[in-house]
Image: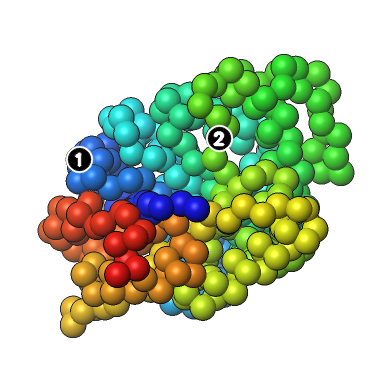
């Protein structure tokens, strides 16, 4: 049982408040503020008429979405401790060998600080723009991560699937000789019994799209039941999610009031909290105050049981 949580900052909109180049300066500040991880979400392109299917976020097709691997590489160069997290990278939009090379390179550059969160996304237009079949995205993701694993840890690697195939292929740098374990994986997918295969195959954590503790607890129970009954896996599932947000009179999410929801989220199984900068920092002048408040959050799970 994990006895500590992590506090991470999702930096989407940082470039809208400052500039894309500000990630260098702000990454240092995030680490200095004692935040555990820098989180980058992903969209490659947007169609002109899209609606976010999960609610709570107005989608503007011309919003800025910097490439996660590029941004986190810049952050890696100016930090030493903070985790570098994709949450989530729409993996099927990238060929498996390309993704394997990008992830392995960043993992090695950052001395093992990359956590690779992947998912299938929800926007059909992205797949169409990349010439890919939206309907096959789940099976593509599963095979893709199997292929990446082979490229990371086998020398040479071979893989045969319906969507990805190669023989006697070398991916360098790889991860076969890294000390301290394997690249941590997270899947941002629906918590269904059918999707338990992802967590069983890759020993991965679940990145939940919803901050609702009731949804999280139900999803955790579904996945852990399937893992236990179908695969004989009894370990607790690591869960990444935002906390349920509480907004103040200015329309911004309030850190202190949001913390009141932590006991419910932790009881539901959340181990890694991602705070969306989009809602907490609406003005550039609030950046330092908010990250310092996040850095002071207590990490001991027992603290929230009192």
Q: Which residue is mark 2?
A: 183
Residue 166 horizontal/vertical position (percent): 81, 28
Residue 28 horizontal/vertical position (percent): 23, 38
Q: Is residue 297 above or below residue 151?
A: below
User: In 3D space, how far apart are the residues under numbered discs 1 and 2 (Cα atoms)?
Assistant: 24 Å
Left or right: residue 247 compared with residue 272: left
In which image quadrant can residue 188 be found? bottom right
Left or right: residue 122 compared with residue 273: right
- Identify the secondary structure beneath mark 1: helix
Pick whichever, 255 or 103, lies toward us: 255
Q: Is residue 89 above or below residue 208?
A: above
Pick whichever, 58 or 248, lies toward us: 248
Category of crowding for the residue at label 2, using alpha-carbon neighbours closer than 10 angstroms: few (below 14), some (14–19), many (at least 20): some
Can residue 147 be spotted in the picture? yes
Q: Is residue 143 above or below residue 299?
A: above
Residue at coordinates 59% horizontally, 24% vertically from top-left? 175
In which image quadrant can residue 73 be found? top left
Residue 288 horizontal/vertical position (percent): 15, 53
Residue at coordinates 53% horizontally, 54% vertically from top-left? 238
Q: Which residue is mark 1?
A: 32
Dot placed on the residue nearer the N-terminal end, 1 or 2: 1
Residue 50 horizontal/vertical position (percent): 55, 71
């Amino acid at each position: 049982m994990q006895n500590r949580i992590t506090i991470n900052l999702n930096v989407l909109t940082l470039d809208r408040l400052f500039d894309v180049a500000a990630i260098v300066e702000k990454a240092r500040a995030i680490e200095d503020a004692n935040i555990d991880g820098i989180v980058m979400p992903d969209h490659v392109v947007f169609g002109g008429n899209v609606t976010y299917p999960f609610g709570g976020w107005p989608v503007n097709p011309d919003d800025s979405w910097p490439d996660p691997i590029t941004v986190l590489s810049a952050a890696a160069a100016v930090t030493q401790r903070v985790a570098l997290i994709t949450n989530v990278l729409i993996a099927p939009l990238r060929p498996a060998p390309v993704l394997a090379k990008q992830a392995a390179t960043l993992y090695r550059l950052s001395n093992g600080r990359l956590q690779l969160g992947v998912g299938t996304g929800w926007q059909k237009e992205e797949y169409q723009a990349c010439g890919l079949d939206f309907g096959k995205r789940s099976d593509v993701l599963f095979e893709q991560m199997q292929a990446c694993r082979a490229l990371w840890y086998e020398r040479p690697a071979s893989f045969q699937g319906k969507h990805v195939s190669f023989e006697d292929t070398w991916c360098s740098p790889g991860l076969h000789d890294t000390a301290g374990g394997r690249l941590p994986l997270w899947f941002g997918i629906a918590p269904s019994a059918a999707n338990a295969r992802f967590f069983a195959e890759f020993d991965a954590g679940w990145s939940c799209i919803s901050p609702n503790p009731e949804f999280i607890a139900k999803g955790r129970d579904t996945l852990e039941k399937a893992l236990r009954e179908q695969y004989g896996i009894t370990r607790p599932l690591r869960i990444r999610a935002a906390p349920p947000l509480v907004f103040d009179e200015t329309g911004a999410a309030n850190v202190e009031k949001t913390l009141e929801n932590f006991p419910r989220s932790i009881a539901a199984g959340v181990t890694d909290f991602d705070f969306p900068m989009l809602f907490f920092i609406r003005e550039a002048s609030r950046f330092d105050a908010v990250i310092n408040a996040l850095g002071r959050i207590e990490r001991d799970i027992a603290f929230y049981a009192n």
